[in-house]
Image (tube, rainbow, N blue to C red):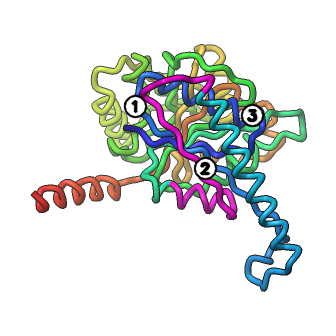
Amino acid sequence: MKNILIPTDFSENSCNAIKYAISMFWDQECIFYFLNTYTPAIAGSRFMAASFEESMLTNSAAKYSQKGLDDLLQRVKKDFVNEKHSFRTISSFSLLVDEVVESIRTYDIDLVVMGTTGATGMEEVFMGSNAVRVIKSVKDCPVLAIPQNFEFEKPTEIAFATDFTRFYTKSELKALLELAAIFDATVRIVHVQYEIKSLSELQLFNLGMLRKYLGGVEHYVHTVSELNSVSKTLEVFSKEMDIHLLAMLNYQHSYMEQLIREPVVKRVAFHTQIPLLVIPELGMTSNLKESSNRDNVLMSN
């Protein structure tokens, strides 16, 4: 059973992310959690005595939030009849990022799916500020960002962008490996280099471990020259190889961090035209947690 969290503001963009997620996991048993947050009062008022007006605003926002979730739930159940899927709603007076982080822990979430804002020339904000904030804040769960108006197609071609400078754990790659298995996908490991050169011993070792984890998954390694920026390079690569989903780890000095920090002018061309799977850096923590859970189960038996 998969637990999938989908933040929604009831916009067409967020509804499209819901459609994508349901379609992607159509044959999998899942619980989908639809999350809507609201903060009607002025900034800082949560730490002061609430006035009557603020209380009224909060009650009104709470009703709007719950009604929106109820209406959404009815539409989803009508449009997507699937015995393998069940749905829950979460309405919370909280900041979006805070509630996403809390919900991941409370509901043992396996994946967060979010819609991303479309790009409009120089006014573009990379993926939308909400998506970026969630990606930067979530440390223990993958985030799948769905571009505006992107219709689901089976991700049979997946690109995994990496520079091989750090060791990967199997737990970090779990979401990538599962999607590759579900859709019998080809994984294209793409390494962007400013200047093409041979891999170091460390990089070769990490590449070897990555290929070991991929096991029977068909995969290829592509080394490409950087075109002005990492984002532009990945955009061009994705188009040329007809990539359906781009995945990358988010850790210090990673490609994902570079994308978030690149000057806006440089990333204007990067419209996240395909879904982006962002995998947090779990390291050995997740392995220790899984080992501890197994030990607890054995002890209870």
Q: Is residue 95 magenta?
A: yes
**Could you tell me how far apart the alpha carbons at marks 1 and 3 are, in whole angstroms?**
24 Å
In this view of the protein, which residue sits in the foreground, 97 or 255? Answer: 97
Highlighted magenta segment, given as a residue range = 78-103
Residue position marked by numbered label 2 in the rendering? 135
Q: Quadrant of the N terminus?
A: top left
Rendering coords of residue 221 (x, y %): 44, 23
Q: Residue at x 40, y 44 (%)?
A: 172
Q: Are marks 3 and 2 in contact (CB under 8 Å)?
A: no
Q: Nearer the viewer, mark 1 or mark 3?
A: 1
Which circle's residue, 3 or 2, is located before the other in the chain? 3
Q: Residue at x 41, y 47 (%)?
A: 166
Indicate the secondary structure of the residue bearing disc 2.
helix
All told, the count of numbered labels is 3
Rendering coords of residue 87 (x, y %): 52, 39
Which circle's residue, 2 or 1, is located before the other in the chain? 1
Residue position marked by numbered label 3 in the rendering? 13
Q: Which mark is residue 29?
A: 1
**Looking at numbered disc 1 in the image, what kind of residue is underneath it?**
Glu
Rendering coords of residue 299 (x, y %): 11, 62
Residue 264 vertical placement versus 252 (above, below): above
Rendering coords of residue 152 (x, y %): 61, 20
